[in-house]
Amino acid sequence: MKRRDEVMVGLTLLLALIVGVGGTIWVARGGLTSGYPMYALFPWGAGLKTGQAVLLAGVQVGYVDKVALVPDGTLAVTMQITKEYKVPEGSLATVEANGIFGDQLIAVTAPVGVSTYMAAGDTIPAGKGSPRTSELLTKGDSIATNIRAITDKVRTEYVEGGGLEDTRRTIADLTKLVAQISTVAAEQSKQLTLTQQQLRKTIASIDSSKVDSTVVNLRQASANLETLTRALDSTRTAVNAVVAKVNNGPGTVGRFMNDPAVYARVDTLLLRLDSLTLDFKKNPRKYINLRVF
């Protein structure tokens, strides 16, 4: 009797488990809610299977009803969309990862602001989905291979080829150069400090009153020079006026200055005067008769 009770309990638990799993699948597929079919085409290897969710803008609106292999390399997917939801025009269907265990779902992305909808039985164009785990692993392997090749190249050229030693020498030389520049800069700073101190002493030793007096004298001399310049200009103007009157005037001075005959007579008179002077120097007794008693 006890054995029979254990068997009945086991069968009851198994039946409850089957009902629970079946009910979950049934609810996931819409339950009592009626729907309409929509279609999409994806390349082989998308990882789709019956019962996977169909999301519209992040909300589950249906499930994958059928997946058929087409010889041209595509998967003909039939989706069952809940009747209360409509797919906007211009939507794209992509296969996205659902969790971390390799499960997939169909994500329908709808454009914003569209008020027209696709009819039941239409095919939703396929968009470019997120890369699958296998693609990411392949890409990671490719990157790792490239990094390994670069590392080998660097080791060959930089370590085995002597590049590391050259770099060390360059760094050492650069360190020496920096030290030399620092020494020169320190010496120049010292000299500049001494120069500034000497300049301060020189400036401090200058008597400001003498400087002010010198500046005042310079200003006075400049004023006197300006006055003298104006006086000379005035004198020059007057002399020019007199000369112009003499040259152009009808008087005796004007005729004397401008008459060539007068110039000739004056020259002759000067020549005779010179001859007389020379003769007087040679023969003074000829002109002076002095007797002493």
Image: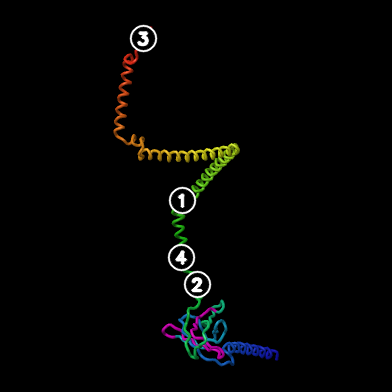
Q: Nearer the viewer, mark 1 or mark 3?
A: 3
Q: Which residue is mark 4?
A: 146
Work out how far the residue at label 1 is from the one at label 3, CA to CA, in angstroms.
Answer: 122 Å
The secondary structure type at the circle numbered 4 is helix
Which comes sooner in the sequence, label 4 or label 3? 4
Q: Which of marks 3 and 1 precedes in the sequence?
A: 1
Using the numbered discs, state the Cα–Cα distance from disc 4 to disc 1 in whole angstroms: 26 Å
| Mark 3 burial class by Cα count in 10 Å: few <14, some 14-19, many 20+ | few
What residue is disc 2 on?
Answer: 137
Question: Which mark is first along the chain, 1 or 4?
Answer: 4
- For marks 2 and 3, the one nearer the N-term is 2
The residue that mark 1 highlights is 166
Mark 4 or mark 3, whichever is nearer to me:
3
In the image: residue 262, left or right of residue 157: left
**Distance from label 4 to label 3 (Cα)?**
142 Å
Q: Are marks 2 and 1 in contact (CB under 8 Å)?
A: no
Q: Secondary structure at mark 1?
A: helix
Label 4 and label 2: CA atoms lie apart by 14 Å
Q: Residue at x 30, y 29 (%)?
A: 267
Q: Is residue 106 visible?
A: no
Residue type at the position of mark 4: Asn
Location of mark 3 (residue): 291
Name the residue rendered at 51%, 80% in the picture. Answer: 95
Residue 79 in magenta stretch: yes
| Magenta highlight range | 70-97
Quarter-wise, where is residue 274 in the image?
A: top left
Q: CA distance from mark 2 to mark 3?
A: 153 Å
Location of residue 26 in the rendering, given as x and y in whole percent from the top left corner: 58, 89
Tell me the amino acid under the disc marked 3.
Arg
